[in-house]
Image: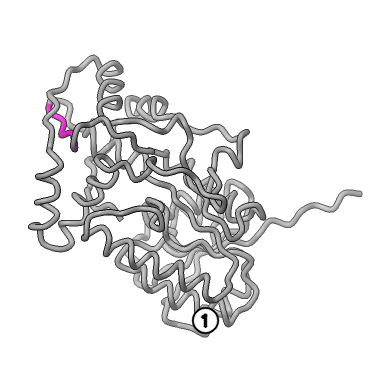
Amino acid sequence: MAVQKEESKILVFGGTGYIGSYMVKASIKLGHPTYVFSRPNSNKTEMLNQLQSMGAIVVKGAIDEHDKLVLLLREVDVVISALAYPQVLDQLKIIEAIKVAGNIKRFLPSDFGVEEDRVSVLPPFEAFLEKKRKIRRAVEAANIPYTFVSANCCGAYFVNFLLRPYEQTKEIITVYGSGETKAVLVYEEDIGVFTIKAATDLRACNRVVIYRPAANLISQLELISLWEKKTGRSFNKVHLPEEEMVTLSETLPDPQNIPISILHSVFVKGVTSNFELGENDVEASALYPDLKVTSVDELLDIFLCNPPKPAIATFG
């Protein structure tokens, strides 16, 4: 008689946030007992109710409640942090609790953007990434089994921001730099599934997993052309030169200088696609070749069927 494999228990910090909610839903869909750590005074009631209705176990608490955190960690196997940028350094408290708990099989810190150990970017974005690097180094120093994830660009978010499909009458689209630099746009649902699979995959332990499917590599000009063909519209492309982007990064107040710095790194410098994978890297779609990945073309079809709400340019 075959013994049924017991699925890993997964705890998600930031599970009611933008990308975190996709991870929680993917975890539940893939059959894992899934816990969501939420602040007692969270205003994400609607999302919490939705996740609970799907089967998530919501645990209320604060990250600085060390003893409570340790007890919770001893109930699970895998920890995923999807905390937003302002809370990145709070992960040091999670790391301390993981060290005390002593049972966590894998920790995925809140990366999920560009591969921060492999890029050179403008100072505002560099300061943003340096906090994430600090967390990576703390995980390594603590000898906690990890998977570092570079999911690159959240596809729906960036398509919404770049094309502004909710503006039905506006025919002007801003193009950053020449518009010819390739970027990696990965659909958020795919990011969720890839992340949960990697979190419980021995092949991804103590490695960097990079999400770079071939069908998700596209330039701004190619993206606009695709959208024009699908909508029958013709857009006036207004280029924002690199020099102006650099100036804006130097003159806008913090944190308003971060989004323009991110746009410069992705769409001018091409940091999501301009390096070769190293021996400790693994590309997610190669790791799971049987997993159907949503192409950029298919993502635009989703936008055609379900017109989105306006994008908010916060970038984490």
Q: Nearer the viewer, residue 301 or 254?
A: 254
Task: Identify which residue is drawn at 21% across, 60% down.
Answer: 124
Which amino acid, mark 1?
A: Lys
Left or right, 302 with respect to 96, comes to left
Q: Which of 279 and 145 is in front in this view?
A: 279
Above or below for 208 versus 166: below
Give the image location of residue 12, x and y in percent: 50, 62
Give the image location of residue 18, x and y in percent: 36, 52
Task: Identify which residue is drawn at 38% across, 29% down.
Answer: 302
Task: Identify which residue is drawn at 38% across, 38% down.
Answer: 184
Q: Nearer the viewer, residue 263 or 162?
A: 263
Above or below for 90 versus 238: below
Q: Is 106 inside the magenta-drawn segment?
A: no
Above or below for 243 versus 169: below
Q: Nearer the viewer, residue 49 or 152?
A: 152
Question: In the rendered picture of this protein, how many numbered marks are placed on residues?
Answer: 1
Left or right, 210 with respect to 127, comes to right
Give the image location of residue 121, x and y in percent: 27, 54
Q: Give the range drawn in magenta.
A: 172-176
Task: Identify which residue is drawn at 18% across, 36% down.
Answer: 177
Q: Report the magenta stretch's main SS.
A: strand
Q: Identify the secondary structure beneath mark 1.
A: helix
| Quarter of image, res 164 | top left
Binning the other alpha carbons within 10 Å of mark 1 as few (below 14), some (14 to 19) or many (20 upward) gives few
Q: Mark 1 points at which residue?
A: 68
Above or below for 244 versus 15: above
- Which part of the image, by quadrant, shows the C terminus? bottom left
Give the image location of residue 31, x and y in percent: 64, 50
Q: Which residue lies furthest to the bottom in this view?
A: 67
